[in-house]
Amino acid sequence: MQENFSLKNFNTFGVEAKAKQFTEICSVEELIQLLSKTVSQPLLFLGGGSNILLTQDFDGIAVKLNLKGISEKKSDENHILVTAQAGENWHEFVMYCLEKNYGGLENLSLIPGNVGTSPMQNIGAYGVEIKDVFHSCKVLNRETLKIEEFNLDQCRFGYRDSIFKQEGKGKYIILEVTFKLTLKNHTIKTEYGAIQSQLEQSGIKNPTIRDISNAVIHIRKSKLPDPKETGNAGSFFKNPTIPSAQFEDLKLRFPDIQGYPNGNMVKVPAGWLIEQCGWKGKQIGNVASHALQSLVIINATGNATGKEIFDFSTEIIKSVKEKFGIELEREVNII
């Protein structure tokens, strides 16, 4: 247990914040032991630090979950169940699966963070979400200190949402996640974003899952800043979903507005809304909206505080609300 510990290297924004105490956990037994001893103390569980914004010091124990390991079990002729411990790096896990030609995760290449946090907000990219390949996960119930298993339905996945962000928030610690991946007859998804055009530029007509992954990695690197070089947490806001009638009214005023119908609702790209309000590439003090992707807020100077970043995001929310009548919701967890 370390005292007055800096969390600067444990959040991808690279903001300075201190935890009263800090410890690393490498086994479920250690975790249960810690929880049984610290009933009254606040705990902050850290994965890859890619989806949090630390706006103040943490007056409790910051816990780095370092549970490691990958195991496999064949499900049927075309499927395999691959289980990764919570502390495994997400992109490295995706690469592990691709090396074995296991299909399903390729569109989720290069997403920062660890496996354990992936079900929390049902991470997704380029037409694929965790729920599409999720089989089950094991969690530790903080109240009973018992291990429980959640299946797909029990997780209640939604857009960047799950039971772990709703009524289960703070109650469960995800220990491992099992994915159902294909061994052959892979489903190739190229219709979303710039994947198809990237494949065409590379002269690929019959892409493999590795080709899809390479295309996604190329697109992400060309559009998004590397957290190791410029502090950020990827997409800061969710894409809002609004009623179709509201979208049609907005289309009369803003003919270029983009939208993706979903039943009687329409998902509107938050990046487009932010850009229309003049925020793309705009910098205030130490914080800026990324010049290539306005959905990403960056620690432009490396010296931003969490509060500066939070206040910057608040101004973006106000601007979009005033111009479009749409309230953006932060995707990043605010601590």
Image (spheres, rainbow, N blue to C red):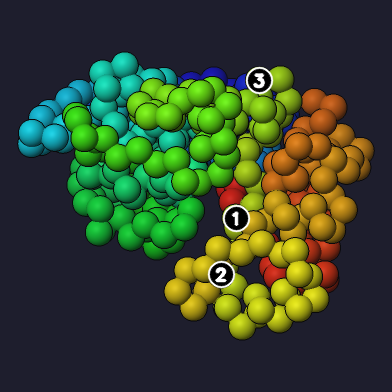
Of callouts 3 and 2, which one flags the residue occurring earlier in the amino acid sequence? Answer: 3
Of callouts 3 and 1, which one flags the residue occurring earlier in the amino acid sequence? Answer: 3
Give the CA distance from mark 2 to mark 1: 13 Å
* Residue sitting at x 41%, y 45%: 128
| Residues at marks 3 and 1 touching, judged by CB atoms closer than 8 Å | no
Give the CA distance from mark 3 to mark 1: 23 Å
Task: Using the image as rendered, state which of residue 122 and residue 194 is in the foreground.
Answer: 194
**Disc 2 residue type (three-letter):** Val
Q: Which mark is residue 228?
A: 3
Residue identified by numbered label 2: 266
Is residue 62 visible in the rendered image? The answer is no
The percent position of residue 126, horizontal first and vertical second, equals: 49, 43
**Disc 1 residue type (three-letter):** Lys
From this view, report whether residue 208 is shown above or below residue 175.
above
Residue sticking out furthest to the top:
99
**Disc 3 residue type (three-letter):** Lys
The percent position of residue 55, horizontal first and vertical second, equals: 71, 43
Residue identified by numbered label 1: 238
* Residue sitting at x 84%, y 58%: 277
